Amino acid sequence: MRQPEIAPLLTLLLAVLLVVPVARTAGDVGLGAAFLIEFLTDGAWRPLSMLTATPHREPMPVPGAAVDRWIGAAIVPVPLVLVHGYSPEGKDDPRVRQAAALLARAGFDVAVPTVPGLTRGRLRPEDAAPVVAALAARAAPTAILSVSIGAGPALLAAAEPAVRERVGIVLSLGGYASAAELLRFFLTGDFQWGAIRGHVTHDPEIVRQFIEANADLLDRPARDVLADPAAAASALQAPPPSLTRLLDQLSPERMVRHIRARLVLVHGVHDPAVPYTESLRLAAARPERTRVILVGVVGHVEAARGVAWLSRVRELGALLLAVYSLSRPC
């Protein structure tokens, strides 16, 4: 290991000592710290890869779903279902594969289903089905890690009566609570929760692509209206009844109380894709056994750019506890 890397690792170790009780095993903490370093540096520092064997990837036989399984060398790996966000290639997306491999190195037995709607920039209630199928094929208790808008299918699945007893913990990274508020934010850039208000300027081309991907929900005049942020804000005050029903079905806040698992909601305070107020909204819908972790070292689902994360000991400690809790789904 190069000398310049020693100070960052000592900083993270200090975070560990401040927040992790000594009763927790050094092995788990060490793997969690190595995972966190590799994640936050986007692989520039690779302590976990240096310490662990390359994981094995294989197709996982799950009826009605396309699922890959990633297995590392852990003696007793923790069953986990990874639910991706917007990924045109689904489970085969390079960043999804990278995340699954890193989780397998950290001691998880990772199942990654492709969520069809999230390969096309659209979500429908049936997109929870592959996640439910993957959970049904896992040993209990299973952990779920959802990324971005993958929180929708993940949390819908975790509330499904057929499998909800199998889920011990759900960790949402950059997820959402209200599909209606997420739509409003995506089309107008405005977000709000309680007294918190903010605005993000979106690329108009990305907004256009999103509207076209969901063209079946609206006629051409309605699509043209939504392409104009000012007009969209007005139109969303009273959306068509069919759209309102769909948004309700896609909103985790409406069924989160049916989830038996612990919830850990990690969100970047400067997230440009899904506002952090969505994690606050979800926690308010089910405060019991729910923890919100708001940090500046994470952007959306990646390390924030231009942030001196090594100076943020408490945030690093909170993230390490989140990783550790994921490895304890009981």
Image: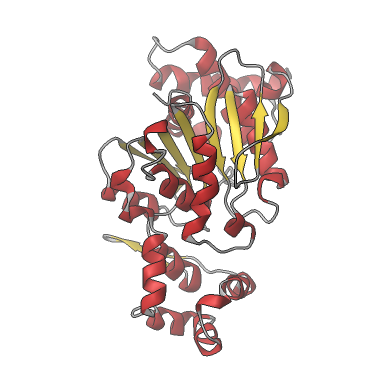
Viewed as shown, does residue 191 lie left or right of 300?
left
Quadrant location of residue 246? bottom left
Query: How many marks are shown on the rendered structure?
Result: 0
Outermost residue to the bottom? 221
Question: Residue 76: percent from the left, percent from the top?
Answer: 55, 15
Image coloring type: secondary structure
> For this rendering, which residue is in front, 323 or 272?
323
Q: Is residue 255 above or below residue 325?
A: below
Question: Residue 309: percent from the left, percent from the top?
Answer: 54, 36
Outermost residue to the front? 63
Q: Is residue 298 visible?
A: no
Q: Is residue 218 visible?
A: yes
Tell me what residue is drawn at x 64 percent, y 19 percent: 6
Question: Residue 60: percent from the left, percent from the top?
Answer: 65, 35
Tell me what residue is drawn at x 41 percent, y 19 percent: 20
Q: Is residue 75 above or below residue 88?
A: above
Quick one: quadrant of the N terminus?
top right
> For this rendering, which residue is in front, 64 or 256?
64
Q: Is residue 265 above or below residue 88?
A: above
> For this rendering, which residue is in front, 315 or 180?
180
Quadrant location of residue 185? bottom left
Viewed as shown, does residue 294 lie left or right of 194?
right
Question: Residue 97: percent from the left, percent from the top?
Answer: 69, 39
Tell me what residue is drawn at x 63 percent, y 72 percent: 209
Quick one: quadrant of the C terminus?
top left
